[in-house]
């Protein structure tokens, strides 16, 4: 699954990350905010989800990712930093995770988890780390 990063500045071309690992490793600043193609701190990813309630839609604008896992572990929890409009400051976090079994087992896959699979389970130390990182956003 590729991720398309847009910019609040309409003159910036869109840029794509090949997958969640590429998005995390190559398209964020030190605080986790997405960078557009010209390395501005105005990058975002627009998503749309139909809700279970009839005729309701959630349109989050993903503004960045804060990682919570340890390097080289298969299971990698993280949070998306979310705003309700592309120009707005982030005001929410969306808990998620990915599992990267590529290279660790035969026919290993990269899987991102959010929604029906449930949220990641985090240790209290990870929550404390998240709160410290959110202070810089």
Image (cartoon, rainbow, N blue to C red):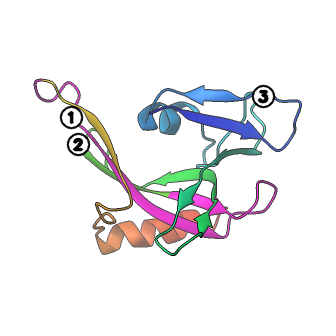
Q: In this orientation, which residue lies closer to the viewer: 16 or 66?
A: 16
- At 38% from the left and 57% from the top, the residue drawn is 114
Q: Are marks 1 and 2 in contact (CB under 8 Å)?
A: yes
- The spot of residue 16 in percent (x, y) is 60, 28
Residue 108 figure quarter: top left
- Residue stretch rendered in magenta on the structure: 80-106
Q: Is residue 62 above or below residue 101?
A: below
Q: Nearer the viewer, residue 48 or 95?
A: 48
Instruction: Please tell me which residue is depicted at 62% across the width and 53% down the height of the picture.
Output: 62
Residue at 89% x, 30% y is 11
Residue 90 x, y percent position in the rendering: 69, 64
Between discs 1 and 2, the one toward the N terminus = 2
Is 45 contained in the magenta span? no
Q: CA distance from mark 3 to mark 1?
A: 32 Å
Viewer-nearest residue: 63 or 30: 63
Taking the image as shown, residue 133 lies to the left or right of residue 97, namely right
Q: Which mark is residue 101?
A: 1
For numbered disc 2, what is the local secondary structure?
A: loop
Q: Earlier in the sequence, mark 3 or mark 1?
A: 3
Which label was assigned to residue 38?
Answer: 3
Instruction: Check disc 2 and report the residue beneath it.
Output: 74
Image quadrant of residue 87?
Answer: bottom right
Q: Position of residue 91 (x, y in %)?
A: 67, 70
């Amino acid at each position: 699954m590729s991720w398309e990063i847009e910019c609040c500045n309409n003159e910036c071309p869109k840029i794509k990350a090949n997958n969640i690992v590429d998005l995390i490793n190559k398209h964020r600043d030190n605080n986790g905010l997405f960078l557009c193609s010209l390395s501005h701190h105005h990058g975002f990813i627009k998503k749309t989800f139909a809700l279970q309630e009839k005729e309701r839609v959630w349109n989050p604008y993903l503004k960045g990712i804060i990682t919570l896992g340890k390097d080289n572990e298969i299971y990698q929890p993280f949070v998306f930093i979310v705003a309700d409009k592309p120009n707005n400051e982030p005001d929410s976090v969306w808990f998620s995770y990915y599992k990267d079994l590529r290279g660790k087992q035969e026919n290993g896959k990269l899987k991102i988890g959010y929604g029906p699979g449930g949220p990641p389970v985090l240790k209290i130390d990870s929550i404390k780390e998240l709160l410290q990182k959110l202070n810089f956003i």
